[in-house]
Image (spheres, rainbow, N blue to C red):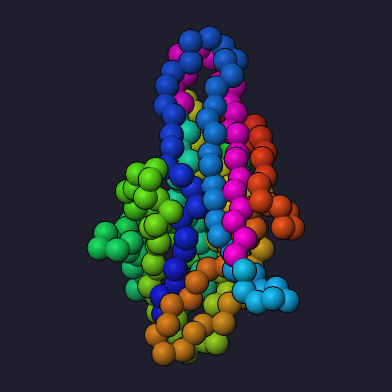
Amino acid sequence: MHQRFESVQAPHYVAATTVSARQRVGTDCKLSAVYKVQEATGTAYLIQTELVHLRLRPPRAGTRYRLDCRGPLVIELPVGAVHLDATSGKQTLSVHRLHTVRLGPGRPIRPQPRTQLVAVDWPDATAATYDDRKLELRLELPHKPRFLRERVVYTASVSCGASSYMHPLVPLIDDLGFVNASTIPRGGKPLDFVLPHLAGGISSHAEVTSTLACPR
């Protein structure tokens, strides 16, 4: 089977070195997505955007930091999933199997029983073309199940001093979120991942500030 994921994070990063202790630094991550909704008059499309302000206060002067809005896509899949391969157009993407994942500077998160963790790097893209690029993940599942159960997190990459971790952007929580159970299409048709809404209800925009940690 193969699954498609939309690119929602605009490519943007900042990297520098602090000049004073507790210097306030950060960057803004822009996200956007289009959702198909059914109304009484027929099919309509809802466009939502979100602006996530990433803020950081490194404890010492001379601390190197980097904030990248397009961190890896982290997916928790059934442990039996094999032959994982990711592409975007003609570009082959890196798929990393993880024993744990750091979604913050604290204790690493382990996969649930009978699951595995993978991280997929997004394709190279400019700010003008990122939303035209889709990530396709191909995999094989034993016994041809009817449903695919997985957890998916879109992340930003954070590096501060000697600490590196990922910060969840979608969903905007501190773990791997809820389990998605999707019916696997027959006949080789792709399964499109249903992205959680970026804003509540039918709102078109959301804005939030995330204060990140930089361990001493």
Q: Which residues are magenta?
A: 45-65
Is 118 placed above or below 83 here?
above
Per the image, is 202 magenta?
A: no
Residue 169 or residue 22, whichever sits in front: 169
Residue 160 locus on image (x, y percent): 49, 28
Quadrant hosting residue 151 = bottom right
Residue 51 locus on image (x, y percent): 60, 40
Secondary structure mainly formed by the magenta segment: strand
Identify the residue shown where x is 55% and y is 56%: 33
Residue 135 or residue 110, whichever sits in front: 135
Residue 200 locus on image (x, y percent): 73, 54
Is 179 placed above or below 14 here?
below
> Can you see residue 120?
yes
Quadrant hosting residue 66 = top left
> Can you see residue 81?
no
Identify the residue shown where x is 60% and y is 34%: 53
